[in-house]
Image (cartoon, rainbow, N blue to C red):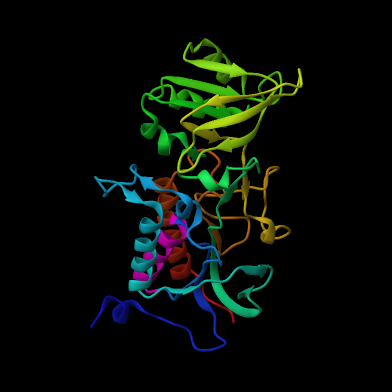
């Protein structure tokens, strides 16, 4: 008898699942591991492009348990196999609509209706990109959006951070611990970051700032070799030889499908009440769709654990009326 035989619980046709998890990154898959092992029937609506941002990442060195590192897609495949091992059902379709105003909750994915007693929203957030030539082609080959993840790969290298907010300045400060030269390239003549963060950067002699400058292309065959830049003020062009480019112009939480039901903040992130609860009873949230601060695979997995445990507690207390 396998683990899946022991843990698998699946509702009959037309009946509600105990929990539907929307998303398929570390938060979603960790939540599924906990809910299935807690004997809750679990459906993952993982999306057509499943796995989250780690599917675009090469070596992950800061996820515990892998002393030699692990490729991002390999890590996500292992998480998925673990969730499915315990009986989670995975549907690789996008959620089109979510009716969270009635019980059981009603979700539509690829034209099919799914009912659930509880929902965990783990749809994550997408990086904003520059949309310039060479950017997407060199992701994982010198182009990154996460200095805490990738900075050690740029020891004694020359790198640039693109952006002017708190995230960009934080990335630059992290990179100074490894890279020999760190440039911040900002299209305006002043930062949008907090005064305290600006002062830290301005006081750091290892950071050089290019004001009123935009990157127009990232050049390289198998890795970043240089960038093409232009001055917004002087209308001149040039190039910089670099080893790495960190894009830090913000994130977009994947919360649009829940607008009108779930309370969102001004940036579109889901508001959290009491650890992982949303404003709707029975709907929980985990990961970067609410977390604007940490944005790490291990922290999103931790939020998934919390949401999974909160769902199990809720199901133990709730008495369904349908």
Q: Main secondary structure of the magenta part?
A: helix
Along the line of sight, the residue nearer the viewer: 190 or 120 = 190
Q: Position of residue 28 (x, y in %)?
A: 47, 60
Residue 186's place in the image compared with 297, above or below, is: above
Q: Position of residue 168 (x, y in %)?
A: 56, 29
Which stretch appears magenta? 26-39
Residue 28's place in the image compared with 239, above or below, is: below
Q: Quadrant of residue 105?
A: bottom right
Residue at 48% across / 27% down in the picture? 159
Residue at 39% across / 65% down in the picture? 80
Residue at 32% across / 78% down in the picture? 4
Q: Quadrant of residue 197?
A: top right
Which residue is outermost to the front? 221
Along the line of sight, the residue nearer the viewer: 155 or 67 = 155
Q: Position of residue 299 (x, y in %)?
A: 42, 46
Q: Position of residue 174 (x, y in %)?
A: 44, 26
């Amino acid at each position: 008898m396998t683990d899946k035989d022991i843990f698998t619980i699946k509702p009959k046709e037309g009946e509600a699942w105990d929990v539907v998890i929307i998303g398929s990154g570390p938060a979603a898959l960790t939540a599924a591991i906990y809910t299935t092992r807690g004997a809750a029937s679990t459906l993952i609506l993982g999306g057509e492009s499943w796995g989250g941002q780690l599917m675009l990442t090469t070596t992950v060195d800061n996820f515990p348990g892998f002393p030699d590192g692990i490729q991002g897609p390999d890590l996500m495949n292992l998480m998925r196999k673990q969730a499915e091992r315990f009986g989670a059902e995975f549907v690789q379709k996008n959620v089109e609509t979510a009716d969270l105003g009635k019980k059981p909750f009603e979700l539509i994915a690829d034209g099919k209706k799914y009912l659930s007693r509880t929902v965990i929203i783990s749809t994550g957030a997408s990086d904003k990109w520059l949309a310039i030539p060479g950017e997407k082609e060199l992701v994982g080959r010198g182009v990154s959006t996460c200095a805490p993840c990738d900075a050690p790969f740029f020891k004694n290298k020359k790198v640039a951070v693109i952006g002017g907010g708190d995230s960009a300045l934080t990335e630059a400060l992290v990179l100074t611990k490894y890279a020999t030269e760190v440039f911040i390239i900002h299209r305006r003549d002043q930062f949008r970051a907090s005064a305290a963060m600006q002062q830290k950067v301005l006081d750091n002699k290892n950071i050089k700032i290019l004001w009123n400058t935009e990157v127009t292309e990232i050049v390289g065959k198998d890795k970043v070799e240089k960038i093409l830049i232009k001055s917004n003020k002087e209308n001149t062009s040039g190039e910089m030889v670099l080893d790495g480019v960190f894009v830090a112009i913000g994130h977009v939480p994947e919360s649009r499908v829940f607008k009108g039901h779930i309370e969102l903040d001004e940036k579109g992130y889901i508001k959290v009440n009491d650890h992982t609860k949303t404003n709707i009873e029975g709907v929980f949230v985990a990961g970067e769709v609410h977390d604007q601060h940490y944005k790490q695979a291990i922290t999103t997995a931790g939020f998934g654990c919390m949401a999974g445990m909160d769902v199990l507690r809720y199901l133990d207390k709730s008495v369904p009326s349908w």
